[in-house]
Image (cartoon, helix red, strand yellow):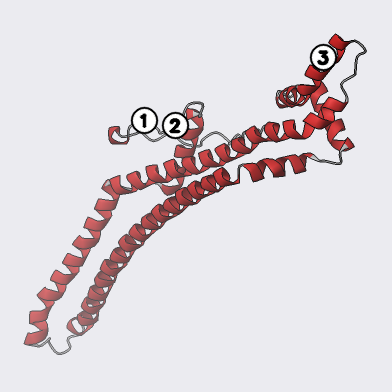
Amino acid sequence: MTQQPTHLPTQTGPVPDRLPIFGPPALLAGEDSAAYDNLLARVSGNLKPSDIFEEIWMREIVDLTWETLRWRRHRTALIEAAVPQVLEKILQPLASKSVPRRGSFVGQLHAAQEALHAGPKLASEWAARDPAAIKRVEELLASAGVTMDNVVAQAVTHELDKLERFNRLIASAEWRRNATLREVERRRASFAEKLRHEVGKIEDAEFQTIEAEPEAETGGTKPSAAEASNSPHLLADTASANKNVTALTATEGAA
């Protein structure tokens, strides 16, 4: 019944430095700090945070993902802990029948005591993964037409309220993680939209400037006074748009 942990491949990049404001990782006793660092490196390598806000969101995504995995492990552990208790109740009448009866009064007394503890003893040995106990349990369950799936189903039924609480904790952590991911996407989409707007202004301004040049080169009519007065403003708009794009790009790169 013990679930073997899944070993992820080692991280492909260095673990990001943890800023003091974040504190140490929120790990419980028995949790693997190397596995947490592996997850952190993988998420960081995928999101590539560009500033402090995305760094905060990235850490939150990592912690919520770790929290989700933690609740899933605890949910499985809860079922595993309940199985021996259910198994003990099922095995007690089956195991007690197999205890030999002795002729003397003292022998019968010992046999009765042994039969009384036969179920708990066998269930405990089964939980410790004793090969002989595992084989004996399989034989007794088969003689009663019971499978291990039946035992696990009863264990789940006994712990259903607690399992439902774990499910709510898992759903909450997943919802918060997904909401944070949407915030990252929304912020990056907003920056991309601003960048496209500024680039569009530059392209429009340069197109208008090029359109005005051929007439001057071919000796055509000179631009009117109004057109001439608009040229400085056109150049100023182009310079302003160039400056906005440079500022946006510099801000993203510096972050």
Q: Nearer the viewer, residue 92 or 232?
A: 92
The answer to whether 74 appears left or right of 19 in the picture is: right
Give the residue type at disc 2: Leu
Q: How many marks?
A: 3
Residue 75 placement (x, y as % from top left): 58, 40
In the current view of this chain or complex, which residue is farthest to the bottom? 221
- The label number, if any, that marks residue 24 in the structure image: 1
- Nearer to us of marks 2 and 1 is 2
Q: Is residue 95 left or right of residue 243?
A: right
Q: Quadrant of residue 140?
A: top right
For the residues marked 3 and 1, what is the alpha-carbon distance in whole angstroms? 59 Å
Classify residue 150 by image quadrant.
top right
The disc label shown at residue 27, or none:
2
Residues at circles 2 and 1 in contact by the CB criterion of under 8 Å = yes
Identify the mark at residue 109; answer none if there is no mark.
Answer: 3
SS class, disc 2: loop
Nearer-the-camera pick, 162 or 95: 95
Does the image show residue 18? yes
**Image x and y of residue 143, in percent:** 89, 36
Comparing 118 with 104, the one in front is: 104
Task: Name the residue rendered at 42%, 51% in the picture.
Answer: 176
Marked residue nearer the N-terminal end (3 or 1): 1
Which circle, 3 or 1, is nearer the viewer?
A: 3
